[in-house]
Image: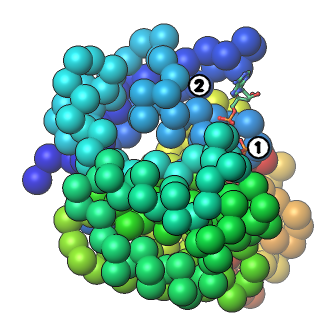
Amino acid sequence: MEPYVEISNLQKKIDDFQLGPIDLAIEPETITALVGNNGSGKSTLLKLIMNLASSDSGNIKLFNTPVGKEDESWQRNVAYLPQSTIGMDAYTGNALKALIESLYPKWDNALFMELINLFDVPLNKRFGKMSQGVQQKLNLALTVARNTPLLLLDEPTAFMDIPSKKFFMDILIDWMDKGDRSIIITSHQVEDIKKLSDYLFVLRNGKVIGNFEKEALTESYKRYWLNSTLPNTAIPGEVSRAHPQIVSNHPEETEIFLQKNNIGWIDRKSLELEEIITLLLTV
Ligand SMILES: Nc1ncnc2c1ncn2[C@@H]1O[C@H](COP(=O)(O)OP(=O)(O)OP(=O)(O)O)[C@@H](O)[C@H]1O
């Protein structure tokens, strides 16, 4: 099957911030988490995908149709939840629902009502009078119920309470189970990333660090507790050291080196995803 999203050599400069070049393909039935430090360009990338910002160079194709050209058929296949919405304050939940329902032919009203009931959103209240968390829940219901094959979610749980975050993850997992769909999600919540994502597309200050398969990424980092001193120079795979510990992202190479040089270790452990992301974004 063709990828849902194909991005090649995408670049965008905003003042002194440079995003890209980005090459990325989103395959069907995958969840990709966009991970990065604040201001690394995650929201900008989603806006570029939605043609809400223009790139300086490169191409984006959604469902094999170039974005930014006359053919806008791709828009029917994507639902985007921005980090913040404007212009909604005066409308009630019911009015917003009626508007969006009329624009999306595959609107799933049963799913919308299920989410509204689960999140306890008062549909007769004006959007501007709802708390930030309730606004986020309504926006999420208005987005997911569009029933498009591709969902783009920009920090969807930032204001949600703890039980709602759990419901949210269950909802997305059920939604994916229906098949032929994919999600791109930006999140600073390590639990969201850990539970939901298949891939982590990591950006650091606009530069691509990599697109990692989550399980492979987690397995590739190991911490060793050594029982003798290390050479002063970096050893193969070494990412950080704080004697008697070292962290490696190429454990096989590290272990060959340690054995050859008669450096023993008393323990070896995998790293938590949170630690791995921290290393990717700071070291
Ligand atoms: N409308 C704008 N005007 C000026 N600069 C902008 C604008 N939008 C984004 N930027 C700049 O682009 C860079 C990337 O911002 P972006 O919001 O994409 O980052 P992010 O990774 O989503 O950040 P965060 O994790 O804080 O949400 C930042 O340096 C930001 O200041």
Q: Which mark is first along the chain, 1 or 2?
A: 2
Residue at 24% from the left image edge and 77% from the top image edge: 178
Residue at 20% from the left image edge and 24% from the top image edge: 71
**Proximity of marks 2 and 1: CB atoms separated by less than 8 Å:** no
Give coordinates of residue 52: x percent, y percent. 49, 28
Q: Is residue 206 visible?
A: yes
What's the mark number on residue 155? Answer: none
Residue at 32% from the left image edge and 48% from the top image edge: 103
For the residue marked with disc 1, what is the amino acid? Asn
Residue 46 appears left or right of 159: left
**Cα–Cα span, label 2 and label 1:** 13 Å
Quarter of the image where ligand 1 sits: top right
Dot 1: what SS? loop
Residue at 52% from the left image edge and 58% from the top image edge: 95
In the picture of the structure, the residue carrying the numbered disc 1 is: 38
Dot 2: what SS? strand
Label 1, ligand 1: CB separation under 8 Å: yes
Give coordinates of residue 114: x percent, y percent. 44, 84
Give coordinates of residue 88: x percent, y percent. 63, 47
Among the 4 quarters of the image, the one containing residue 151: bottom left
What's the mark number on residue 19? Answer: 2
Q: Is residue 219 visible?
A: no
For the residue marked with disc 2, what is the amino acid? Leu
Label 2, ligand 1: CB separation under 8 Å: yes
User: Colour mode?
Assistant: rainbow
Total labels: the figure holds 2
